[in-house]
Image: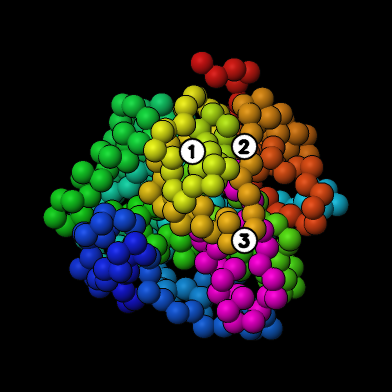
């Protein structure tokens, strides 16, 4: 296995014995891993899942795969296409990273696995944990969508409903993560998750014949899809497989937009003065204090991208608009379409990250 390294203070640790975060500065780990170049010509004969990009992945020969990845890319306008990541086994893009964490946990053989989530990451960890035969506990906010809670329970995971917001849920899980024999399957702190989400961009690169769109639009809460995309773009460029980096366009709900506020203020990390928070339909990206904030802001700036925000009314309208086009997507998953559906600055791809069956249609108002 590769080693962890801390991007903030330089601490290193073997994966097999590491704490779930840097013990010195408490930052999330990165992974010391050097991928090999992928030949586009070699791909058609390979397994039809994200594991076809084996040279770029830090784990190989998985025992827990459910056939995740290789989701369709569908044109919605002359300039904007959508990648249908809600067609994953657990109906969200989080399967890309969850399969990596479950495979890693299976090899490390902990006494138990825990995860925290606003819903989709928890359902993915529960499913892949079941596939791997792991004892899983998933922490979610008590107001998590009923269908997501039902899905977690259906996979046999122990469910912990936490009073309060998403941050309270994360704190509860992190306290339990320090117990002996526990593997913290954190989609935020564990970098193996990012090496799963980066396959989203490898698939775009393959589907577009060895190129990428001018802009990659992603919803950002904890930033796992954006940081995975940034990893893949860097790897493809380093191997001479793309000539230019696409702009990363990050989308947040206006109601919970700490990263957008920091970006437009020119800050390197979250602002000292917290931005006001309000209820939002985009529960999956309602993250007030993302631990990888510095990395997210740095990645967007390096790509010459930007942050966009969307209102609750725009989210409602975007969900109905996509449904009218034949695509029923959950309210968090429509945020990028709400922000960039009228994109005209070159070509762009938006992810449709979660199925509408997970939350149903957005209500007319948020109380």
**Residue under pointer 2:** 309
The residue most toward the right is 78
Q: Position of residue 338 (x, y in %)?
A: 69, 37
Q: Position of residue 235 (x, y in %)?
A: 55, 74
Q: Nearer the viewer, residue 180 or 312?
A: 312
Mark 3 closeness class: few <14, some 14–19, many ≥20 residues within 10 Å: some
Say how the picture is coloured: rainbow
- At a point 78% along the width and 57% down the height, the residue shown is 347
Q: In the image, is residue 30 part of the stretch drawn in magenta?
A: no
Q: Position of residue 281 (x, y in %)?
A: 55, 29
Q: Nearer the viewer, residue 242 or 90?
A: 242
Report the disc number at residue 258.
Answer: 1
Judged from the image, the secondary structure of the residue bearing numbered disc 2 is: strand
Q: Nearer the viewer, residue 21 or 187?
A: 21
For the residues labelled 3 and 1, say whether their Cβ atoms are less than 8 Å apart: no
Give left or right: position of 213 versus 94: right
């Amino acid at each position: 296995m590769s080693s962890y390294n801390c991007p903030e203070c330089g601490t290193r640790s073997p994966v097999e014995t590491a704490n779930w975060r840097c013990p010195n500065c408490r930052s999330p780990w990165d992974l010391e891993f050097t991928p090999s170049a992928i030949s586009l010509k070699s791909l058609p004969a390979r397994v039809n899942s994200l594991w076809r990009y084996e040279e770029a992945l830090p784990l190989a020969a998985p025992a827990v795969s459910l056939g995740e990845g290789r989701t369709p890319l569908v044109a919605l306008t002359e300039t904007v296409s959508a990648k249908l990541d809600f067609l994953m086994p657990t109906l969200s893009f989080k399967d890309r990273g969850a399969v990596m964490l479950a495979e890693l946990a299976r090899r490390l053989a902990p006494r138990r696995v825990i995860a925290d989530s606003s819903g989709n990451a928890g359902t993915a960890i529960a499913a892949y944990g079941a596939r791997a035969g792991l004892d899983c506990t998933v922490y979610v906010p008590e107001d998590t969508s009923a269908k997501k809670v039902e899905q977690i329970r259906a996979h046999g995971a122990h469910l912990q409903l936490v009073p309060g917001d998403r941050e309270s849920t994360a704190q509860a899980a992190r306290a339990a993560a320090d117990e002996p024999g526990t593997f913290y399957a954190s989609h935020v702190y564990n970098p193996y998750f990012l090496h799963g989400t980066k396959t989203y961009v490898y698939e775009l690169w393959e589907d577009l014949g060895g190129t990428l769109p001018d802009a990659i639009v992603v919803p950002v809460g904890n930033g796992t899809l954006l940081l995975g995309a940034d990893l893949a773009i860097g790897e493809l460029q380093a191997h001479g497989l793309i000539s230019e980096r696409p702009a990363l366009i990050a989308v947040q709900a206006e109601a919970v937009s700490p990263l957008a506020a920091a970006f437009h203020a020119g800050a390197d990390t979250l602002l000292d003065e917290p931005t006001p928070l309000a209820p939002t339909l985009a529960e999956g990206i309602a993250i007030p204090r993302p631990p990888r904030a510095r990395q997210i802001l740095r990645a967007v700036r390096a790509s010459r991208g930007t942050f966009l925000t969307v209102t609750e009314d725009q989210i409602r309208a975007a969900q109905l608009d996509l449904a009218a086009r034949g695509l029923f997507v959950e309210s968090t998953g429509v945020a990028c379409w709400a922000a960039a559906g009228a994109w005209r600055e070159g070509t762009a791809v938006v992810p449709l990250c979660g199925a509408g069956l997970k939350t149903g249609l957005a209500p007319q108002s948020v109380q």
